[in-house]
Image (cartoon, helix red, strand yellow):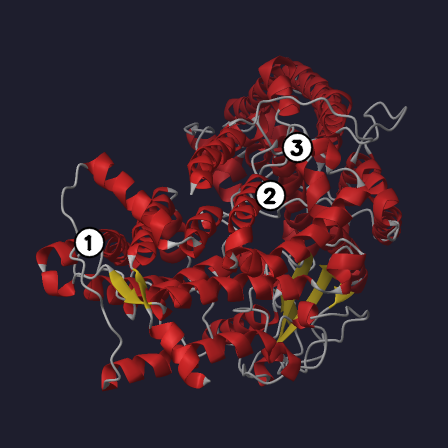
Amino acid sequence: MLKKYTTYLQNPVKAAPLAVFRILFGCLMIFSTLRFVSQGWVNKYYIEPNFHFKYYGFEFVTAFGQYTYILYAVIVLSALGIALGYKYKIATVLFFLSFTYCELIDKTYYLNHYYFVSIIGFLLIFLPANCYFSIDAYRNSKMAFSKIPRYNILVIQLMLCVVYFYAGLAKINTDWLLRAMPLQIWLPSRYYLPLIGDLFQKEWVHYAMSWFGMLYDLSIPFLLLFKRTRIFGFVLVVIFHVLTRVLFPIGIFPYVMICSTLIFFGGGVHEKIINFFRRFFKINFLNETQTLYWTPNVKNRLLATIFVAFFAFQLVVPFRYMLYPNELFWTEEGYRYSWRVMLIEKGGYVQYKIVNPKTGNWFYVEHNKFLTEYQQKQLRTQADFILEFAHFLEKHYKEKGIKNPEVYAESYIALNGRLSQQFVDPTVDLTKVTESFSHKDWLLPFKDTIHGF
Amino acid sequence: MKNFRLIFPFIIVCLSAIVWSCSDDDSVSERTDDFDRQAMLINWADDIIIPSYQAFSSDVDALKAAVDAFESQPNETNLNSVRQEWEQAYIAWQNISMFNIGPAETTFMRSFLNTYPANVSEIDTNISTGNYALQSVNANNEQGLPALDYLLFGLAESDAQILEFYTSNVNSSNYVNYLTDLVDRINTITDQVVASWEGDYRDTFVNNSGAASNSSTNKLLNNWMFYYEVTLRNGKVGIPSGVYSEGSRLPQNVEAFYKKDLSRTLCLEALNAFQDFFNGAHFDGTTNGESLSSYLNFLNTMKNGEDLSLMINNQFEVSRIAISNLDANFINQINTNNNLMLVAFEELQANVVLLKSDMFSALSIDLEFESGDGD
């Protein structure tokens, strides 16, 4: 029985899909990084701020002032290496490390799609995507293969399935399905769009789009996996992502997903795409037609173990929120890395109060003096930000001469159209609280219930 | 694989649709929904912002006329008429200070007209040397309504002594010159801003009616919220009462410090103007037009939520009562019973939660001007 599966995974298939994926992914990363730099975001997000919100456990990751641009140069060059399939091993390792490093500098800018890029970068290190239609294959015929074991393509496909399916599962909750939240808040504000702008004012449209979005995310993996529904599924992918691009400021993510899902198509389609590249760029080089076979050596066994462990991690991590009491959307404990996208609209407000225990004197902090607008926006609604900044204030006012300052936060959050409710327990001195993976019991409980995943 | 041939053109059509939809924000669509955002912008511009500026401008003209009269005949009657016109203008200013957008933003109007406390030592130096450049950004606390406050009320204890600075003082002509220069500068900036609103800027403002981060609604409301927190709540109440300075009170930071009994009037006027803007009340006070409150009510009928605009208006009312309970002179209040100042601060504060957290979220307006990508 097991043998049947392993043979299926080892069966050689055309390498073209992985090559096309490599080229498109590399090109998109070059484009996205250049766009990031040209918008001035490197300076604005990483160089200008005096203070950075750190990922727990990654406090050592820092920006390098003006030299941060070098990191971005490394990302662009390594992405170019990936696209061309040139020194691919080094390129993928460099890409994964430099891109991930940049993301780790400040969690203010966390986005699921950056996490997705990091993951794909990681997986590409272990996949022979440079064996076909690449400079490496051209220069070294020993590296050139036109067929590779099937699992190499399945790995990317499976990752995409996880993203869609988990995004769909996350939408099965009472706010999304029974209150059409937060679409009911977001869509009416897109009134200015031609044709659809008026539709967005109708309540039934909010519900229809919520339900469609949930069903779409859950069914896309299956529509793409089965040959008979593949084209239909891909058309849906394009429509859906184009729509999200029009509605929300989500950068290049829609293009990444549209290009990535091409990998579900058969080798024939991708060979046609590659032939198109060949004609367009007038490349005469034809790949070797060798087949890369899977052999049970140490390296391959190790690879298999890595993949199994990796996917076990991916499947389990989104459910870690179950270990925490209280509402996930409220505390956001276990919210990141779980493909929960567009699920919550939060308005927030936070005010810090510093108390000098010796004199009893107190004062409020004008935190716009320390943080950028973007950082303040994240600070207002997320508990780990609130705590980290409280510790920064403790240190800051200690240096200013207050012995053992106490730091309290008065904080309110309006979640998915509900009225604001107090978030942090205002009687808790945050200097006495330490960050950890355990439940943040200094948060006040959410006074409503949201059922679902 | 015939189908594949169809997919490529399809993708190209879709991608060009993206490009088209992102680059073209000018396309005007026929709107049929019940709430017209552009009507809200028109109401703001035509019935609130422009009339408020015009009213302030005519008060500044009156102030200038009074100063001219004082310049030719510096006597106590003319000094008092300058003071009255200054007071009128300072009150009228509270109606426009919150609109720091467009020409007001580019001319740094709020910074030049109302940065307090005034830098008295610099002002004294300016007068004695007769050498100053009021256009300099750093000179923002050497001019404007607070500097006039000092020149009209703060030079000495008694009115007779103050008058002497303009008559018998060795530098008397310098004092008169500085006074007229300050009023001229206010007049110049105001004329510039009013001319811009009466000219092209009104249409620019009204037609930028989208919901992007640089749309009129987003920019104005972000400015408006910032004004409420920083200029109104902190500037008028919080900072003087020591909320940000570890319990040490700063009565010298009260607005209209030298006039003394005007601080409560200015604060109440600012609060009323702010609330009127929320409700879309026309400047002439006759009717209400499309506004934040009517927008909230419109959205509310859709989702059957709490009546947020009512809650916000109630909180304005509570804040007004708390401020009314204060001494007409905030300096007295701070020195006798600062707790009442703190009560007023907390009431103003309570509305920040409703406005910033609830209202901005309900209207789906980003609380920042420029943001990166989301997911």
In front of the other: label 1 or label 2? Answer: 1
- Write the residue at 56% across / 52% down: A229
Q: Earlier in the sequence, mark 2 or mark 3?
A: 2
Q: Amino acid at mark 2?
A: Tyr
Q: Is residue B176 above or below residue A260?
A: above
Give x and y (percent) for residue A272. Answer: 32, 44
| Residue marked by disc 3 | B152
At horizontal 74% and vertical 27% (from top left) the residue drawn is B44
Q: In terms of image quadrants, where is residue A423?
A: bottom right
Which type of secondary structure does the marked residue at label 3 adopt? helix
Q: Position of residue B88 (x, y in %)?
A: 76, 27
> Which part of the image, by quadrant, shows the C terminus of chain A?
bottom right
Q: Nearer the viewer, residue A128 or B162?
A: A128
Q: Are marks 1 and 3 in contact (CB under 8 Å)?
A: no
Residue under the point 87% across and 53% down: B306
Marking on residue B116: 2
Q: CA distance from mark 1 to mark 2?
A: 67 Å
Residue A68: x %, y % from top left: 29, 58
Residue type (three-letter) at the residue carrying disc 1: Ser
Amino acid at circle 3: Leu
Name the mark on residue A134. Answer: 1
Looking at the image, residue A126 sits to the left or right of residue A44; the answer is: left
Front position in the image: A309 or A98: A309
